[in-house]
Image (cartoon, helix red, strand yellow):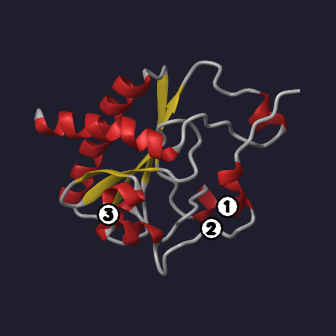
């Protein structure tokens, strides 16, 4: 039998994860990029790695404004969010060559939002047959890349693509 060791997840599973006071997304607005895995910053939003990803390269586009829904954002913020989604898709295609993506927003707890009070968009790279027995039987996702490694892989691509525009 093979073993999959993921000791870095134990504090999360026990509910012992250190979280900043207040909104975790608002905290990232002024935090150092590398500490919080922020890959790109715009005027109205930023792109960050999801701390609890569904797959390698799972990103989130988050407005700097603390609001619960997309309809609470003005046109410049909404426009920048969609531009950040497109930028993220280009970066992820280059870095991981996925077969597809899930892009979406969960509005409200009933819709599955883990942090319902601060709207955010998910970008999840997908590969053919990327669902295996682990999530189905063991309710565990296998993410073979550490967040720091994903950050190191993605950050230079974000920088390069942003400098080319």
Give me the C-alpha separation between circle 2 and circle 3.
19 Å
Q: Secondary structure under badge 1?
A: helix
Q: Quadrant of residue 35?
A: bottom left
Residue 144, image x and y in percent? 60, 34
Give me the C-alpha separation between circle 1 and circle 3.
22 Å
Residue 20, image x and y in percent? 49, 75
Q: Which mark is residue 17?
A: 2
Circle nearer the N terminus (2, 3): 2
Q: Is residue 87 above or below residue 130?
A: below
Q: Secondary structure under badge 2?
A: loop
Give me the C-alpha separation between circle 1 and circle 2.
5 Å
Residue in front for this viewpoint, 84 or 52 = 52
Image position of 59 (left or right of 90): right
Image position of 39 (left or right of 130): left
Residue, x 59% and y 18% (percent of image)?
A: 128
Q: Quadrant of residue 82?
A: top left
**Residue 4 visible in the snapshot:** yes
Q: Which residue is mark 3?
A: 32
Residue extending farthest bottom = 21
Residue 94, image x and y in percent? 34, 24
Picture quarter with the C terminus = top left
Circle nearer the N terminus (1, 3): 1
Does the CB distance between marks 2 and 3 fall below 8 Å? no
Picture quarter with the N terminus = top right
Circle nearer the N terminus (1, 2): 1
**Residue 123 visible in the snapshot:** no
Q: Is residue 73 above or below residue 55?
A: below
Residue 99, image x and y in percent? 49, 19
Residue, x 67% and y 53% (percent of image)?
A: 9
Does the CB distance between marks 1 and 2 fall below 8 Å? yes
Residue in front for this viewpoint, 133 or 15 = 15
Q: Which residue is mark 1?
A: 12
């Amino acid at each position: 039998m093979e073993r999959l060791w993921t000791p870095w997840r134990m504090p999360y599973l026990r509910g012992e994860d250190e979280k900043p006071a207040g909104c975790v997304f608002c905290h990232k607005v002024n935090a150092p990029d590398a500490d919080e895995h922020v890959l790109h910053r715009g005027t109205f939003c930023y792109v960050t790695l999801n701390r609890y990803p569904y797959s390698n390269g799972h990103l989130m586009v988050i407005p700097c404004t603390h609001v619960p829904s997309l309809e609470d954002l003005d046109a410049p913020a909404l426009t920048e969010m969609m531009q950040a989604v497109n930028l993220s898709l280009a970066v992820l295609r280059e870095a991981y060559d996925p077969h597809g993506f899930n892009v979406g927003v969960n509005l409200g707890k009933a819709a599955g939002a883990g942090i319902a009070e601060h709207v955010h968009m998910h970008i999840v790279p997908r590969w053919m047959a990327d669902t295996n027995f682990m999530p189905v039987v063991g309710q565990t996702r296998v993410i073979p890349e550490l967040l720091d490694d994903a950050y190191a892989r993605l950050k230079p691509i974000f920088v390069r693509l942003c400098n080319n525009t």
